[in-house]
Amino acid sequence: MLPTIHKDYIPGAIGRIVELHAHYYSQLVGFGLPFEARVARELAEFCERYDGERDGLWLVQQDGNIEGAIAIDGAHAGQDGAHLRWFIVSDKMRCTGVGSALLTAAMEFCAARHYDRVYLWTFEGLGAARHLYEKFGFRLVHQQLGAQWGVEVNEQRFERVCQFTVSPSHT
């Protein structure tokens, strides 16, 4: 069965998104309990205050399982920009175009709400993700050493100034 993208929360989404993040980043860079707890806490808080007019959550489903996610937190979009968060795709869904489909859905949502800026925090060393962000017009605007995720990494902030076009550039 082909994967589908579902908008908004479904039961089990918080746990599965946390699980995907915990496993992937533990293997990649050694993130552990502080990272997993932070993802769980912040994602649960986001879901509790979720407003479908302002916020977005998209889930990739295949065979009844959640295999990817992305969120737009619009709570402070007017002042700081919309915050792209919890973008993850399972190992079996990587390199299938699902990540691009999730980013497209999120950026279309931002365009429909006329969010003039979208930002995300990540860290150096995630080449495939960075390539995808840059295809969608995100640019690195700040970096610093930090340990907000429990292990010291070179944290990076990417921003996209929106002109209300969504398609990735073909560079």
Image: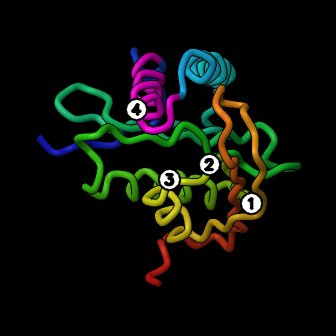
* Residue of label 2: 123
x and y, in percent, of residue 107 in the image: 56, 58
Circle 3 sits in a helix, a strand or a loop, which is it? loop
Q: Is residue 59 positioned above or below 41 on the image?
A: below
Circle 1 sits in a helix, a strand or a loop, which is it? strand
Circle 2 sits in a helix, a strand or a loop, which is it? strand
The amino acid marked with disc number 1 is Arg
Q: Are marks 1 and 2 in contact (CB under 8 Å)?
A: no
In the image shown, does 145 or 110 lie closer to the viewer?
145
State the mark number for residue 92: none
* Residue of label 1: 117
Q: Which residues are magenta?
A: 15-30
Magenta span dominant secondary structure:
helix
In this view, the mark in front (3 or 1): 3
Circle 4 sits in a helix, a strand or a loop, which is it? helix
Instruction: Tell me the CA gap for discs 3 and 2.
Output: 7 Å
Instruction: Tell me the CA gap for discs 1 and 4.
Output: 32 Å
Instruction: Tell me the CA gap for discs 3 and 4.
Output: 13 Å
Indicate left or right for 59 with 29 as reference. left
The amino acid marked with disc number 2 is Phe
Instruction: Tell me the CA gap for discs 3 and 1.
Output: 22 Å
Indicate left or right for 44 with 14 as reference. right
Dot 1 or dot 4, earlier in sequence? 4
Instruction: Tell me the CA gap for discs 4 and 2.
Output: 15 Å
Q: Are marks 3 and 2 in contact (CB under 8 Å)?
A: yes
State which quadrant residue 54 falls in: top right
Instruction: Tell me the CA gap for discs 1 and 2.
Output: 20 Å
* Residue occupying the point 37% across, 41% down: 89
Indicate left or right for 56 with 157 as reference. left
Furthest residue to the bottom? 171
